[in-house]
Image (spheres, rainbow, N blue to C red):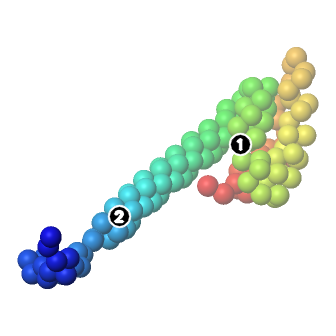
């Protein structure tokens, strides 16, 4: 039988192995976060641009309403004006004042031309709108 206390000389001591996987994981996580943040900001920018373009289009339509046909003009102003109604409290009140002034021109079969007071409310509403 052999002695169990024989020294073993050919086994090397434990060596520390550097593990960089945590740092790789953090790098990938930061890279993915940057890409997602960039995409979110790009989408928000496009959405704001589209919203701004829509507001410009609607204000142009509202400004170019043909007032020679009062019935059609009253309906058009009421419909397009509703787009800007909820911007702030001032536009909300101005829209309701204008809406009340336009009601007599909507529901009658034959209407007179829009009077100057109603046109004044219309012009005031156009000036109040922020684009």
Residue designated by label 1: 83
Q: Is residue 44 left or right of residue 6?
A: right
Compared to 23, does 107 lie above or below?
above
Vertical relation: 23 (above or below) 88: below
Element marked by disc 2: helix
Q: Residues within 10 Å of mark 2 (few under 14, many from 20)?
A: few
Instruction: Give the SS element for disc 1.
Output: helix
- Percent coordinates x, y for residue 45 in the rendering: 48, 55
Q: What distance separates the C-alpha of mark 2 from that of mark 1? A: 48 Å
Residue 58 appears left or right of 20 = right
Instruction: Say whether residue 38 is left or right of residue 60.
Output: left
Write the residue at 89% across / 33% down.
Answer: 103
| Residue that appears at 85% across and 26% down | 106
Tag 2 residue: 25
The quadrant the N terminus occupies is bottom left
For the C terminus, give its image quadrant.
bottom right
Q: Please say whether residue 63 is visible from this viewpoint.
A: yes
Percent from the top left, x then y, of residue 67? 72, 33
Q: Is residue 49 left or right of residue 5?
A: right
In terms of image quadrants, where is residue 127? bottom right
Residue at (67, 32) in percent of width and height:
66
Q: Say which quarter of the image contains residue 104.
A: top right
Expressed as whole percent of the image width and height from the top left, the position of residue 70 reads 78, 29
């Amino acid at each position: 039988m052999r002695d169990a206390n024989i020294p073993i000389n050919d086994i090397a001591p434990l060596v520390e192995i550097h593990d960089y996987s945590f740092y790789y994981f953090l790098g990938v996580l930061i890279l993915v976060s940057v890409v997602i943040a960039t995409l979110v900001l790009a989408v928000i920018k496009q959405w704001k641009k589209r919203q701004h373009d829509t507001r410009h289009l609607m204000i142009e339509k509202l400004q170019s309403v043909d007032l020679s046909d009062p019935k059609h003009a009253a309906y058009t102003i009421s419909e397009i004006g509703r787009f800007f109604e909820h911007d702030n409290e001032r536009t909300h009140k101005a829209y309701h004042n204008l809406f009340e002034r336009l009601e007599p021109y909507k529901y009658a079969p034959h209407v007179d031309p829009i009077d100057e007071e109603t046109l004044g409310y219309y012009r005031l509403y156009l000036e109040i709108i922020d684009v």
